[in-house]
Amino acid sequence: MKPKVIVHGGAGEIPDEHINNHIIGCETAINIAWEILNEGGDATSAVEAAIKHLEDIPEFDAGKGSFLNTEGFVEMDAMIMNGKDLNIGSVAGITRVKNPIQLAKQIMQNNEHNMLFGTAALNFARLKHLEERDPEWFVTEYTHKIWNTNQTDSNMYGTVGCVALDSYGDLCAGTSTGGTKNQQPGRIGDSPLVGCGAYADNLTAGVSSTGNGEDIMKVVLSKLAADLTAIEESAQDASKEAINIFQERTDSQAGLIMIDSQGEISCSYNTPRMSRAWINEKGQIESRV
Ligand code: GLY
């Protein structure tokens, strides 16, 4: 089967000065994932590597550059899901771990549970020798300014995500986030919740969502979009219908990327912008904001 892959760098009012780095970040992430898939790597490895790259770029709200909570430190959420066996790895409210998506993958592959949070998640990361950084390392000039000026407007959803279909026909979806600006300590968004922040099932689709987490949970957006592939004519129609339903029911903002079981790539959003990149039918990178 011909591999497919798409990444996103979040939906919302992406600041003009961040657009260039969003495009470069998404394009380099897609290159990383594409190389893995082309060499026969699996979808899980491709998704993990692409999201790890995006987490390391300060302009995205995930890993370094995550929004700070009201107490001035980051608490991050991430999840990954395989479409073949429906296995899930999810982490919520994690601090210190440089790349939460790596922890999510470790939980999926090496833990009897699907989801860990807080101290227990950190202990498991240490057991797996994942890289750590001091809390100050995650803070950037931009996120510090947002914290310092008490900004809480939630029109920028910098969550990152990736969906891949490998040459064995297996789908994987992943999502990682630093949550929302000045969120309450202990808040957990949609990103680590199965079916909300991401979903993958080889029988339907792989989906990664971004947007207002409180409202994404209400319609279980990623699962909704995946299920709609069974009744809509195309993946693009299913993506669009999921966002329509989301908007009708919540009057809120979100975006999603999807690859269906046939390998059709799609994206839909009702925010002003959503950064994303994918490999088109000719094997070339395309990106949009
Ligand atoms: N969608 C990311 C969040 O609300 O935390």
Image (tube, rainbow, N blue to C red):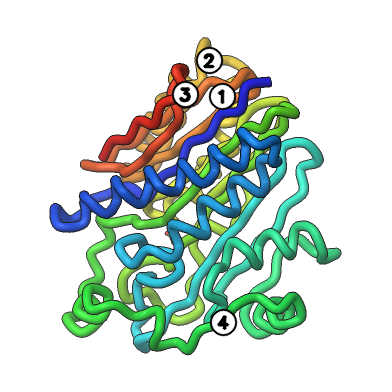
At label 4, counting other C-alpha atoms closer than 10 Å, the crowd grade (few under 14, some 14-19, many 20 or more) is some
Task: Say which element carries label 1.
Answer: helix
Please provide percent x and percent y for residue 273: 24, 42
Q: Do labels 2 and 3 touch, CB within 8 Å?
A: no
| Residue occupying the far front of the picture | 39
Please provide percent x and percent y for residue 68: 35, 78
In the displayed structure image, the side of residue 232 where residue 80 appears, left or right: right
Q: Look at discs 2 and 3 and give the one toward the viewer.
A: 3
Q: Look at discs 3 and 1 and give the one toward the viewer.
A: 3
Please provide percent x and percent y for residue 18: 21, 56
Q: Do labels 1 and 2 touch, CB within 8 Å?
A: yes
Disc 1 marks which amino acid?
Leu
Q: Which residue is mark 3?
A: 283
Q: Write the residue at 44% across / 39% down.
A: 256
Q: Which residue is mark 4?
A: 132
In the displayed structure image, the side of residue 88 where residue 238 appears, left or right: left
At label 1, counting other C-alpha atoms closer than 10 Å, the crowd grade (few under 14, some 14-19, many 20 or more) is many
Disc 4 marks which amino acid?
Glu
Q: CA distance from mark 2 to mark 3?
A: 26 Å
Q: Which residue is mark 2?
A: 232
Q: Earlier in the sequence, mark 3 or mark 4?
A: 4
Q: Look at discs 2 and 4 and give the one toward the viewer.
A: 4
Please provide percent x and percent y for residue 101: 59, 61
The quadrant of the image that shows the N terminus is: top right
Disc 2 marks which amino acid?
Glu
Q: Write the residue at 69% across / 41% down.
A: 41
